[in-house]
Image (cartoon, rainbow, N blue to C red):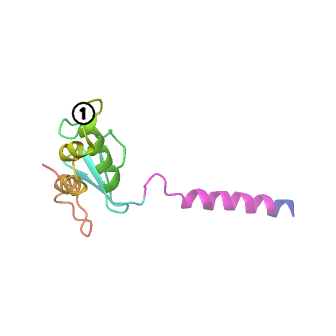
Amino acid sequence: MCLRKIFLIVFMSVFIISCDNSDNSSNVIIKIYGYAEYDCTEKKYRITKETPMIPFLKVNKWYSQKQFHEAHYEDTIKPFKDMPMSEDSLKKIAPTLELSNQFLYELTTGVDCNNPKDILF
C-alpha cells in the first residue's frame, strides 16, 4: 500500500513537471536577424541583444502587443513627465496604440508563423 502511494506521488510529480510549458520549449520561435525573436505560439516579441533602435525593450524579456505599446508609450513620455503639461498635449506627443502596433509589425515583417523560418541577413 505504501509503495503504491510513493509510486503514485512520483508519477504525478513527473507528469506535472513534464506538462509545464514555462520554458516555452514547445513554442514556435522565429529568430529575426540575430537580435530578436518572435514567439508564434504566444504572439510575443523580444530582443536578444541591445539595440539603439528599440531602447525601451529589455533584453530577453517577452512582450505581448499590449506590453510593447506600454513600454513604447512610457519611454516616449519619460522626458516630459516632470514638465507642466496638459493631458491633451501629452497625448499629441505619446504614441497611440495604432502607432505602436505598426512599429511592432515593422519589426516582425517577414515572420510567417504558418511556415516558420528564421529571418537572416
Image position, residue 118 (x, y; %): 22, 55
Q: Could you tell me how many numbered marks the image carries? A: 1
* Furthest-right residue in this view: 1
Dominant SS of magenta comes to helix
Image position, residue 42 (x, y; %): 37, 60
Q: Residues within 10 Å of mark 1 (few under 14, many from 20)?
A: few
Which residue is found at the position 23% from the left and 60% from the top? 117
Identify which residue, 93 or 59, lies in the foreground. Answer: 93
Identify which residue, 41 or 5, lies in the foreground. Answer: 41
* Furthest-bottom residue in this view: 114
Q: Quadrant of residue 49?
A: top left
> Is any atom of residue 54 visible in this view?
yes
Residue that carries the numbered disc 1 in the rendered image:
80
Image position, residue 68 (x, y; %): 30, 49
Identify which residue, 92 or 24, lies in the foreground. Answer: 92
Which residue is found at the position 37% from the left and 44% from the top? 61
State yes or no: residue 30 in magenta.
no
Which residue is found at the position 23% from the left and 39% from the top? 76
Q: Quadrant of residue 116?
A: bottom left
Q: Quadrant of residue 98?
A: bottom left
Q: Is residue 72 above or below residue 11?
A: above
Image position, residue 114 (x, y; %): 26, 70
Q: Which region of the structure is painted magenta? A: 5-25
* Furthest-left residue in this view: 121
Given the image, on which type of amino acid does mark 1 rest? Phe
State yes or no: residue 18 in magenta.
yes
